Image (cartoon, helix red, strand yellow):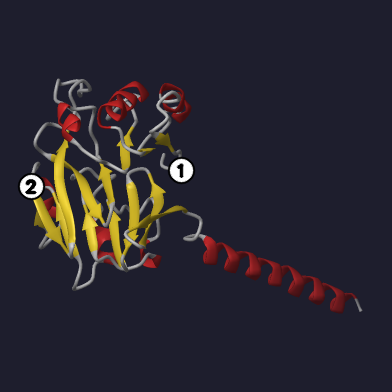
């Protein structure tokens, strides 16, 4: 009788473990936050993966931005139509992640310095505009003015890294990459959705992000790549800017 009870208990515990492991595996890639926007009669879906890593879906096309394995299991992510790489640093460029989502139809857009790590990429320089898979993409500057390494070299020197402006129907999306509130941001026009980095010492302070936002006035602003920075500081700084909506997502 005791053996029967022990066997039943063992089976019950085993079943609980199996169910738990299955549920964890099944939901691990489904916990990313998403926002959906109307764009020219269709939808633009933005998935917030983490840090500087995003995924956009528009008109059936999947656009991965700076895919990095530490932010997601890319063996479970959808294949890419376009991959955007802002620059060559390891938290933005991960060749292993790229291999998992790259197909024979994937277009990879990157900066010159990333070319050595990714085969057959489309190199875009600051200021260049291209149409890729039917989507207009402009590469814009991304660099430091104030924050430098101990040797005096900027964390992100001028003319190397890219930010990108994407025209997606009637939505213009600016993904800034690693940058500060550089003068070139003043030239941006009609940005609907902006992603601005906010972690020290590598990119911007909340004050710098607020200054940039007040300059080119995106309709929706997402701080991203923000590490341990208190995002509420940015909310407070922009609380009186009624035409700029600050949205906070899990983008540490």
Q: Indicate left or right for 208 with 126 as reference.
A: right
The residue that disc 1 covers is 250
Residue at 30% x, 54% y is: 67
Q: Secondary structure at mark 2?
A: loop
Residue 244 coordinates in the image, percent (x, y): 38, 33
Work out whether mark 2 precedes mark 1 in sequence or the reverse, and give the earlier one: 2
Residue at 43% x, 23% y is: 240
Considering every residue shown, the one lying at the far right of the view is 1
Which residue is nearer to you in this view: 56 or 31? Answer: 56
Residue at 25% x, 27% y is: 215
Which residue is nearer to you in this view: 247 or 168? Answer: 168
Q: Residues within 10 Å of mark 1 (few under 14, many from 20)?
A: some
Q: Residues within 10 Å of mark 2 (few under 14, many from 20)?
A: few
In the depicted structure, whether residue 3 falls above or below residue 33: below
Q: Secondary structure at mark 1?
A: loop
Residue at 63% x, 70% y is: 18
The residue that disc 2 covers is 128
Residue 16 coordinates in the image, percent (x, y): 70, 67
Q: Are marks 2 and 1 in contact (CB under 8 Å)?
A: no
In the depicted structure, whether residue 79 falls above or below residue 92: below
Q: Indicate left or right for 139 with 249 as reference.
A: left
Q: Quadrant of the N terminus?
A: bottom right
Mark toward the viewer: 2 or 1: 2
Residue 50 coordinates in the image, percent (x, y): 40, 47
């Amino acid at each position: 009788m005791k053996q029967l009870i022990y066997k039943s208990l063992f089976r019950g515990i085993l079943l609980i473990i199996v169910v738990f492991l299955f549920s964890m595996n099944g939901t691990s890639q489904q916990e990313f936050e998403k926002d959906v926007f109307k764009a020219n009669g269709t939808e633009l879906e933005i998935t917030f993966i983490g840090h500087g890593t995003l995924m956009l879906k528009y008109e059936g096309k999947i656009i991965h931005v700076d895919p990095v394995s530490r932010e997601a299991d890319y063996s479970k992510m959808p294949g890419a139509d376009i991959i955007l790489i802002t620059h060559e640093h390891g938290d933005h460029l991960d060749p292993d992640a790229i291999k998992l989502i790259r197909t024979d139809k994937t277009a990879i857009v990157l900066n010159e310095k990333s070319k050595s790590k990714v085969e057959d990429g489309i190199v875009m320089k600051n200021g260049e505009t291209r149409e890729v898979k039917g989507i207009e993409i402009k590469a814009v500057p991304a660099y430091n003015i104030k924050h430098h390494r101990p040797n005096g070299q900027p964390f992100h020197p001028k003319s190397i890294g890219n930010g990108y402006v994407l025209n997606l129907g009637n939505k213009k999306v600016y993904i800034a990459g690693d940058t500060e509130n550089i003068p070139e941001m003043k030239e941006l026009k009609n940005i609907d959705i902006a992603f601005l980095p906010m972690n020290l010492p590598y990119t911007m302070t909340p004050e710098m992000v607020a200054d940039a936002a007040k300059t080119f006035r995106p309709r929706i602003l997402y701080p991203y790549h923000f590490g341990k920075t208190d995002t509420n500081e940015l909310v407070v700084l922009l609380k009186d800017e009624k035409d700029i909506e600050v949205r906070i997502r899990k983008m540490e």
